Image (spheres, helix red, strand yellow):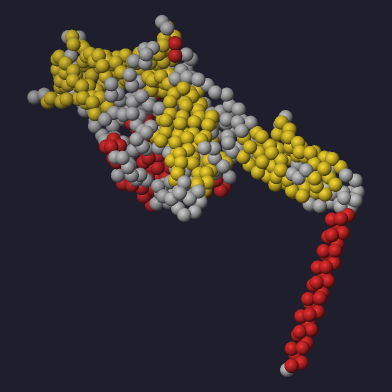
Amino acid sequence: MQKFIVLFFLLVFLPYPVYAAEEFSTSYDVSYDVQKDGITNVTQKINLKNLTSQYYVSNFTLTIGSTSITDLVASDEQGNMETSVESKDAKTAITVKFNAQIAGLDKSQTFTLKFKSKDFAQALGKTWEVNLPKIPSQGKIDGYNLVLSVPISFGDPTSVSPQPKSESQSFEKLFFSYSKQQLEKSGVSVNFGTTQVYDFNIKYPLENNSLFPVLTTITLPPDSNYQDVFISQITPEPLNITIDEDGNYLAWYRLSRGSKFEVSVNGSVKTHINPKSKKVPQLSASEIKTWTKSDTYWEADNPAVSNTLQEIFQDGTPKTNKEKVRLIYQYVVATLVYDTNRLGSNDIERLGALTALNNPTKSICMEFTDLFIALSRAAGVPARELDGFAYTQNSTLRPLSLSKDLLHAWPEYFDENLGWVMTDPTWENTSGGVDYFNKFDLNHVILAIKGVSSETPYISDIVKVEVSDRDFLLKPKLEVEIDLANNIWAGLPIQAKLKVKNIGNTVAPPFTLNLQSNHLNILKDKSLHLDSIPPFGFTEITLDLRTPFNLQANEDVLEVSIGEQKTGKKVSIKPLLSIQTYPYLAAAAVLLFLSIYGAILLIHIIRGKSKNSKRKF
């Protein structure tokens, strides 16, 4: 007697194993036809083959990585098929009932599923992004062919991953074809556009309840190799803005006792799909030590983390950072399970890497990031946490979970050949295998970098970020102030203080400051190499100067130049021995004589008292 089986097939990777019966094999011809409005028409032509005479199938379930399915139609040679739909978390299960049972060895059934979804393509300002999930590893799949078509009005693709086996254009459409072997490793990601601009407003409430004035800092969005930051206004203006070891911009404020006010920061961020510079930074030994050390939520030196790393590298430790991290990334994506129930809490507790290992089903973006960093650091790969805004049209497929606002966490690691590289294991897990390792997107805006510490710097949760359709011009502008007396005496040591301030709207890259003068001797180097200065920030330099001893007055100029920009300070050098200085020299001589005479007299008196004291005994 034949046995009945209901066959389940999964288009997305699930966090727990659900396998198709090995008694059946499947093959697929799939097309994703993206329309100008971003709605995607999906057609799945599926052939199901019976590999045994003992079983037959009457139902088939397809689970896809989408939460918005419309216009579902299923049909076979006999006509339309009965369907049912069930959505849960970030997935939708489509079940079809066959019009005829597939019974008998090598018997097959071909049927077609058609539906529409808005989850595969999204507009971002003037750019478009298309993301398709990879095929699952479960079940016996004989063949899988996929064709993606997009309107040519999207423009030329700026990044395609993986590279299609063929590419063509016809009827106002671009076509990309993929094979089973390509989609077993990753999903398909196609970007149209190289940059995206966001406008932001961040508010920081500051309050000092102590008895004494305090200095405090707030964190501003930093520049990176994948984003430019434009700061248009900070109210009230800070005392200074400095750059910490991780590259964060820190605005400094002095809070008097009992003071309370709010800082508002307005600006824009331009994200880049490709790195702005191909020059790879070189990390020093101390930097490598800093970004590979164990920390509160990155327990890299814990035995459980070390044992997990040995399991990941059981076939041998890769030689390069990228190959080490690839295996770690795959492990994190496959092991952790995103827990949407935790998002309902107003105060989400951060668990850390070790707890994530012990409780993999209780993870949100922080745990995906923490575990990735801890394992990478345990493998000797520098890794850091990025906190910020991430644009998503579907927060179920690409969730945000740092706060009630649109904040997200994702990691980056250091590649010897590429520099710092961003990844997002959370979104690859929740989107059904969209590749966030080999390529990134324009959707992530960095608001803070955590590398020296897993806990600081803090970022505000009062954040508003909007996609902008305008561009901005980056204009760093340096202003030099020279603090030097107008009149100086020849032969005497003097000091000059330089204040170099960035009054532009974006960071000033490292630069060289050149000093020049005719009569003033500059004791330090006349060429000073200075680090980057963020907008609204400044740096101060103290110069030790000397003038030659002479009997004639001179006029001179201390000139400071940065590129073609020059700033000068005129000074009058007066001889130390001149008619004007005689009264001062005479007074100094009299004062010196009186001081010496007074000292001798005091010594004489003390000695006299000492002799008289001895005579009494």
Q: Residue at x 84, y 40 (%)?
A: 555
Label count reads: 0
Q: Position of residue 333 (x, y in %)?
A: 36, 35
Residue 188 lies in quadrant: top left
Residue furthest bottom in the image: 617
Instruction: Reply above or below: 19 against 359.
Output: above
Instruction: Reply above or below: 75 against 287.
Output: above
Q: Position of residue 171 (x, y in %)?
A: 41, 5
Left or right, residue 542 beside residue 355:
right
Left or right, residue 262 beside residue 58:
right
Residue 191 lies in quadrant: top left
Pick the front one: 535 or 48? 535
Q: Residue at x 43, y 26 (%)?
A: 466
Residue 96 lies in quadrant: top left
Pick the front one: 71 or 237? 237
Q: Position of residue 271 (x, y in %)?
A: 49, 27
Q: Position of residue 615 (x, y in %)?
A: 76, 92
Residue furthest left in the image: 1
Residue furthest top in the image: 171
The reply to whether residue 345 is visible in this rendering is yes
Instruction: Reply above or below: 222 against 87.
Output: below
Pick the front one: 107 or 99? 99
Pick the front one: 249 or 9? 249
Query: Could you tell me which quadrant the C terminus lies in?
Result: bottom right
Query: Could you tell me which quadrant the N terminus lies in?
Result: top left
The reply to whether residue 247 is visible in this rendering is no
Q: Residue at x 33, y 42 (%)?
A: 348
